Protein backbone atom coordinates (compact mmCIF):
# COMPACT_ATOMS: atom_id res chain seq x y z
CA UNK A 1 0.00 0.00 0.00
CA UNK A 2 1.40 3.42 -0.96
CA UNK A 3 -0.45 6.42 0.55
CA UNK A 4 1.95 8.93 -1.07
CA UNK A 5 4.80 8.67 -3.61
CA UNK A 6 7.88 7.23 -1.92
CA UNK A 7 5.97 5.84 1.09
CA UNK A 8 4.87 2.24 1.43
CA UNK A 9 3.12 0.49 4.28
CA UNK A 10 3.77 -3.17 5.09
CA UNK A 11 1.30 -5.51 6.78
CA UNK A 12 1.57 -9.05 8.11
CA UNK A 13 0.03 -11.47 5.64
CA UNK A 14 -1.57 -13.62 8.35
CA UNK A 15 -3.73 -10.91 9.94
CA UNK A 16 -3.12 -7.69 7.95
CA UNK A 17 -1.72 -5.97 11.06
CA UNK A 18 0.64 -3.05 10.42
CA UNK A 19 4.32 -4.05 10.40
CA UNK A 20 6.46 -1.34 8.75
CA UNK A 21 6.61 2.04 7.06
CA UNK A 22 9.08 2.37 4.15
CA UNK A 23 10.26 5.81 2.99
CA UNK A 24 12.30 5.94 -0.24
CA UNK A 25 14.61 8.91 -0.94
CA UNK A 26 16.64 7.78 -3.96
CA UNK A 27 15.41 6.47 -7.30
CA UNK A 28 17.31 3.17 -7.26
CA UNK A 29 15.68 2.07 -10.50
CA UNK A 30 13.86 4.08 -13.21
CA UNK A 31 10.35 5.13 -12.26
CA UNK A 32 10.65 4.28 -8.57
CA UNK A 33 8.77 6.99 -6.62
CA UNK A 34 10.72 8.99 -4.05
CA UNK A 35 9.50 10.93 -1.03
CA UNK A 36 10.08 14.69 -0.96
CA UNK A 37 7.99 15.83 2.02
CA UNK A 38 8.50 16.66 5.70
CA UNK A 39 10.20 14.15 8.02
CA UNK A 40 10.24 13.78 11.84
CA UNK A 41 13.26 13.30 14.17
CA UNK A 42 15.48 15.80 12.28
CA UNK A 43 15.59 13.39 9.32
CA UNK A 44 16.32 14.78 5.84
CA UNK A 45 15.63 13.49 2.36
CA UNK A 46 19.40 13.64 1.61
CA UNK A 47 21.61 11.93 4.20
CA UNK A 48 24.67 9.73 4.33
CA UNK A 49 26.06 7.31 6.90
CA UNK A 50 28.36 9.94 8.47
CA UNK A 51 25.44 12.32 9.00
CA UNK A 52 23.24 9.55 10.46
CA UNK A 53 25.93 8.52 12.94
CA UNK A 54 26.63 12.14 13.92
CA UNK A 55 22.91 12.57 14.72
CA UNK A 56 22.02 9.20 16.26
CA UNK A 57 25.32 7.67 17.42
CA UNK A 58 26.39 4.08 16.89
CA UNK A 59 23.77 1.71 15.45
CA UNK A 60 22.22 -1.18 17.37
CA UNK A 61 22.98 -3.44 14.39
CA UNK A 62 24.64 -2.96 11.01
CA UNK A 63 25.67 -4.78 7.85
CA UNK A 64 28.12 -3.41 5.32
CA UNK A 65 27.81 -3.62 1.53
CA UNK A 66 26.93 -7.09 0.18
CA UNK A 67 25.98 -8.78 -3.11
CA UNK A 68 22.45 -9.73 -4.11
CA UNK A 69 21.88 -12.00 -7.14
CA UNK A 70 20.81 -10.06 -10.25
CA UNK A 71 21.04 -6.65 -8.53
CA UNK A 72 24.73 -6.92 -7.60
CA UNK A 73 26.44 -4.97 -4.83
CA UNK A 74 24.14 -3.07 -2.42
CA UNK A 75 25.16 -0.72 0.35
CA UNK A 76 24.06 -2.39 3.55
CA UNK A 77 21.99 -1.08 6.46
CA UNK A 78 22.01 0.11 10.07
CA UNK A 79 19.34 -0.11 12.78
CA UNK A 80 18.70 2.56 15.44
CA UNK A 81 16.20 3.28 18.20
CA UNK A 82 15.29 6.96 18.40
CA UNK A 83 14.95 8.75 21.75
CA UNK A 84 11.33 9.28 22.71
CA UNK A 85 10.09 6.63 20.28
CA UNK A 86 8.46 3.44 21.53
CA UNK A 87 11.01 0.73 22.36
CA UNK A 88 8.92 -1.56 20.12
CA UNK A 89 10.00 0.37 17.00
CA UNK A 90 13.39 0.35 15.32
CA UNK A 91 14.49 2.59 12.46
CA UNK A 92 16.49 0.94 9.69
CA UNK A 93 18.61 3.08 7.34
CA UNK A 94 19.22 1.46 3.94
CA UNK A 95 22.39 2.65 2.18
CA UNK A 96 23.71 2.74 -1.37
CA UNK A 97 27.21 1.42 -2.09
CA UNK A 98 28.39 5.07 -1.71
CA UNK A 99 26.78 5.07 1.79
CA UNK A 100 24.06 7.57 0.86
CA UNK A 101 20.72 6.86 2.56
CA UNK A 102 18.51 5.17 -0.03
CA UNK A 103 15.57 4.94 2.34
CA UNK A 104 14.48 4.30 5.90
CA UNK A 105 12.10 1.80 7.45
CA UNK A 106 10.19 2.28 10.70
CA UNK A 107 9.67 -1.31 11.82
CA UNK A 108 7.98 -3.11 14.71
CA UNK A 109 10.47 -5.24 16.65
CA UNK A 110 8.09 -8.15 17.06
CA UNK A 111 7.85 -10.91 14.48
CA UNK A 112 4.78 -11.85 12.48
CA UNK A 113 2.45 -14.22 14.36
CA UNK A 114 1.89 -17.70 12.88
Image: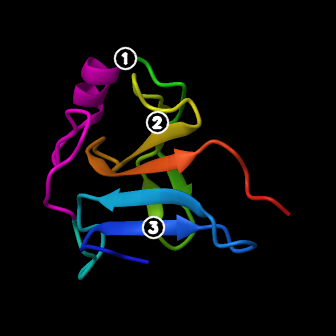
Q: Any magenta on residue 55? A: yes
Q: In the picture shown, does residue 68 fall above or below 38?
A: below
The answer to whether the residue labelled 1 contacts the one labelled 2, judged by CB atoms less than 8 Å apart, is no
Q: With 2 as the anchor, is 59 left or right in this view? A: right
Spatial separation of the CA atoms under disc 2 and disc 3: 20 Å
Where does label 3 land, which residue?
9
Spatial separation of the CA atoms under disc 1 and disc 2: 11 Å
Where does the image place residue 8, in percent across and percent down from the top left?
A: 40, 69
Q: With 96 as the anchor, is 113 left or right in this view? A: right
On residue 43, the disc is none
Comparing marks 3 and 1, which lies closer to the viewer? 3
Comparing marks 2 and 3, which lies closer to the viewer? 3
Q: Residue at x 30, y 33 (%)?
A: 49
Taking depth in this image into account, of 65 and 34 the one nearest to the observer is 34
On residue 78, the disc is 2
Magenta span covers which residues?
35-56
Amino acid sequence: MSPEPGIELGFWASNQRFEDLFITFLETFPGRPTYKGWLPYQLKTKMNQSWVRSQYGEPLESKGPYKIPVRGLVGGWETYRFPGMSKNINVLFKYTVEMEVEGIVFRLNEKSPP
